Amino acid sequence: MFVYADNAATTKLSQEALAAMMPALTDLYGNPSSLHQAGREAEAALWDARERIAACFSAKPREIYFTSGGSESDNWAIRSAAETGARKGKRHLITSAFEHHAVLHTLKKLEKEGFEVTYLPVHEDGLVRPEELRAAIREDTALVTIMYANNEIGTIQPVEELGAICREKGVLFHTDAVQAAGHLPIDLSAAPIDMMSFSGHKFHGPKGVGGLYVRTGVLLRNLIEGGAQEFRKRAGTENLPGILGMAAALEASCRNMEASAQRVSHMRDRLLQGIRSIPATRVNGSLTHRMPGNLNACFEGIEGESLLLRLDLAGICASSGSACTSGSLEPSHVLLAIGVPKELAHGSLRLSLDETNTEEEVDHILEKLPGIVAELRAMSPVWDEAGQRMKAVEV
Ligand SMILES: *Cc1c(COP(=O)(O)O)cnc(C)c1O
């Protein structure tokens, strides 16, 4: 059996998205900037997609900028706000300790360029505290950027409260909503969010396309010089197939959101029960303020990477949620930020389900996982089999 339980990393292209892309990959090949009939048809399709995406977020089409994905949107929003702030002498930025690297690495670079960054703590429940944000805002704060939902532990931040504080203090608020968009209802006509990043491939759209929402009146700096695309802010002939696919995927996700969240959280909760019956296991982050499909747990005495390999042999695609992809053996910065001890953070597992998963697949994971954990522990030098816990580690 093949089980894809890594939907926080990326998702399968939906039938709706594929069908919407096909015309732009075949007959609808005009350049939206061309004045002739083929160009006008492409331009009409492009605008239609912008309108439909805006409608899903209760935004205006003029507030949606297409990009190459979540990373670009994060970079763009943060750089733009920093540059705008700096012109007014504001060189202080606020974020949280467990953001995606697209946010953290952009901020690290800005620190080298003379900006000052405050990293708000994330508590054991995987949430930042609004009152701590309020206390951190200064006269010279140019931007607050805090993610909507975390990609590793799935916790959902109190964005409305955080945004309201920013608005009250007159500070720009950006949120990386790459995990949330298409999965949680987002109403930008009501929420105090100034900028928001999203990405097509996290909700069954194609890869390499995303967007940045920028509220009317918020100054956005040019990203790419050249043609007049994206309201003269980001030049380059538009990725029309990607954009049409993303629009169709987002609409389908938003249409099925409630029913899908119910079905997915039911499967996740069954997984959770099964995982809790494994001894010496810690489930990470709040279970109430959480994405419906996310489960993140640490198993004492084992290495996340060996666990992933064994799961892979059993046909299960999962993630450790750690920086293993970068080849480093450093445990996840997200787990460390919420206070998981380093030894334990090495044994982390993220399972991320969505509406494409089935109850049978959950059964398969529940059938395989406890045995694999037990086998790895039996081989582990740091596992105390008799005590059923991790041996005290010499530091
Ligand atoms: C996946 C992800 C990104 C990066 O999006 P890409 O489209 O892959 O560049 C950024 N932030 C979060 C929270 C993500 O999950």
Image (tube, helix red, strand yellow):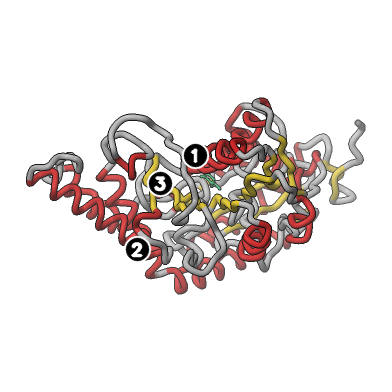
Q: Residue furthest left?
A: 37
Checking the image for residue 210, the label placed there is 3
Say which amino acid is labelled 2.
Glu
Q: Nearer the viewer, mark 1 or mark 3?
A: 1
Residue 7 seen by the camera: no
Q: Helix, strand or loop at disc 2?
A: helix
Q: Quadrant of residue 88?
A: top right
Depth check, front residue: 300 or 343: 343
The answer to the question of whether label 2 and label 1 lie on touching residues, with beta carbons closer than 8 A, is: no
Q: Residue 290's spot in the image, x, y percent?
A: 63, 63
Residue drawn at (55%, 50%) of the image: 176
Residue 142: give x, y in percent of width and height.
64, 44
Which residue is tagged 2?
251
Label 3, residues with CA under 10 Å away: few <14, some 14-19, many ≥20: many
392 sits left or right of 73 in the view: right
Q: Residues within 10 Å of mark 1 (few under 14, many from 20)?
A: many
Placement of 395 over or under 272, stated as above or below: above
Q: Within 8 Å: ligand 1 and the Cβ of disc 3? A: yes
Q: Nearer the viewer, residue 212 or 259?
A: 212
Q: Can you identify the residue that label 1 sits on?
A: 76
Label 1, label 3: how far apart the Cα atoms are: 12 Å
Residue 239's place in the image compared with 135, above or below, is above
Q: Amino acid at mark 1?
A: Trp
Q: Nearer the viewer, mark 2 or mark 1?
A: 1
Q: Position of residue 315 (x, y in %)?
A: 49, 46
Amino acid at dot 3: Gly
Quarter in which the C terminus is drawn: top right
Give me the C-alpha separation between circle 2 and circle 3: 14 Å
Along the polypeptide, which appears first: circle 2 or circle 3?
Answer: 3
| Mark 1 lies within 8 Å of ligand 1 (Cβ measured) | no
Q: Nearer the viewer, residue 352 or 92?
A: 92
